[in-house]
Image (cartoon, rainbow, N blue to C red):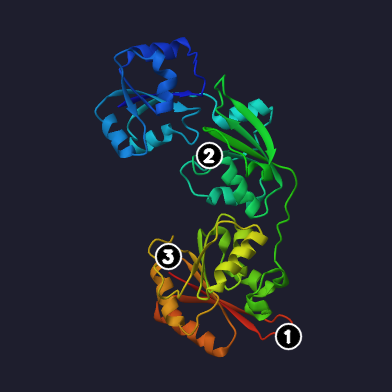
Amino acid sequence: MHFTIIGIDDNRHQEFPSRIREILASHAIYSGGKRHHDIVREWLPANHQWIDITASLHEVFRQYEQHRDIVVFASGDPLFYGFANTIRKRLPDARVRLFPAFNSLQTLAHRLLLPYHDMHVVSLTGRPWHEFDRALIEGREKIGILTDRQHTPDTIASRMIDYGYDNYEMHVGEELGNEETETVRTLPIGEATTTAFRSPNCLILQRTKIKPRPFGIPESEFELLDGRVNMITKMPVRLLTLSRLDLHQRHTFWDIGFCTGSVSIEAKLQFPHLHVVAFEQRPEGADLIRTNAARFGTPGITALVGDFTRLDLADLPAPDAVFIGGHGGKMDEIIRRVNEHLLPGGIIVFNSVSAESRKLFARGIERHGLTLADSHRLTVDNHNPIEIMKAQKQ
């Protein structure tokens, strides 16, 4: 199969160079979104066949397979989070010829006369919030964002305000390339939460000041469970625990028994690439972790309330790092369930406060085929010593 992929913008009066005009006049099968069809229809032969690119890509590619030579229209640069990548992934043997245009974020930067060589790009088009949350926590100076009907500029701004990221201004480009309706505007994040924007659009966030990103949050700054300071992992213990989990090269972290959420929040703050799933049996935990996550600017933590040994874990991403912050007398069952999902080479860390809990953890990991890698004893102020135990799955 042979694909010719042509990038266009929203200009309703496209001016194609002679080479592309020859291609358009000599083919019969064309494809793209409905908006693309409206824009290029006047350039296509009267008897042309058009294949709509819809959410059901299986049906789209089924139709493609009935033809040998197809011209596809895409927005901007088809290799920039674009449809050319989809074609190459699904039909790796197909021949592809490409005629790109500026992508929408480049066009917006051009309108603003904004240098974009240092811009960090995130696509929220049909994607979850994870990479956007990561860029916020990392404090990127410029963030270019591709949007969709769910991830609109106002919903993006609302998420930023919820987690304390008002330290950006938002540049929004609407219907870029359309000579009649194109709009570019710059507004504060707070104002963007109540503003309606036309689609299609994209935006660039430009940092106005640096948001502090603490390394080691004092326990006194967290919202506590009934004000009980002993129900939180102390900062030195928390930091040593995270170091033992080796999180810089892990992907998914489970925090079992999160209570205030301090370990999950510290992990997300220091390792924003992580997918963090936190579990807590107490119902009060849901409000606590929500409050503390907003306070310390850590969106994207998945919090589940209920007995870990009974929760449905099937749809969760498999962890390669696990912290057991509380076991409620069910240590063996917790280790068994964790081990069922833990990836090979994955790590479990447990902070023991007594000889009995040390024995329970040691017996549990031995019974379920894990290896005790090492342990460290730490004493903070006048508190009892804490044994930080690390086990690994072969």
Q: Quadrant of the N terminus?
A: top left
Q: Earlier in the sequence, mark 1 or mark 2?
A: 2
Disc 3 from disc 2: Cα separation = 36 Å
* Image coordinates for residue 83, horizontal then vertical, percent: 42, 33
Q: Looking at numbered disc 1 in the image, what kind of residue is underneath it?
A: Asn
Q: What's the mark number on residue 228?
A: none
Disc 3 crowd, CA 10 A, few/some/many (<14, 14-19, 20+): few
**Marks 3, 2: nearer the viewer:** 2
Mark 3 and mark 1: Cα distance apart in space: 38 Å
Find numbered disc 2 in the image and state the secondary structure of the residue it sits on: loop
* Number of numbered markers: 3
Please give the name of the residue rendered at 68% of the width and 30% of the height, measured from the top-left corner: 114
Q: Quadrant of residue 191?
A: top right
For mark 1, what is the residue? 382
Whether residue 285 is visible: yes
Can you identify the residue that label 2 sits on?
Answer: 147
Q: Nearer the viewer, residue 173 or 384?
A: 173
Q: Nearer the viewer, residue 381 or 24?
A: 24
Query: Judging from the image, what secondary structure is the residue with disc 1 in?
Result: loop
For the residue carrying disc 1, how many other residues have a C-alpha within 10 Å: few (<14), some (14-19), or many (20+)? few
Give the residue type at disc 3: Pro
Percent x, y of residue 344: 42, 65
For numbered disc 3, what is the local secondary structure? loop
Say if mark 3 contacts mark 1, CB within 8 Å.
no
Q: Which mark is residue 344?
A: 3
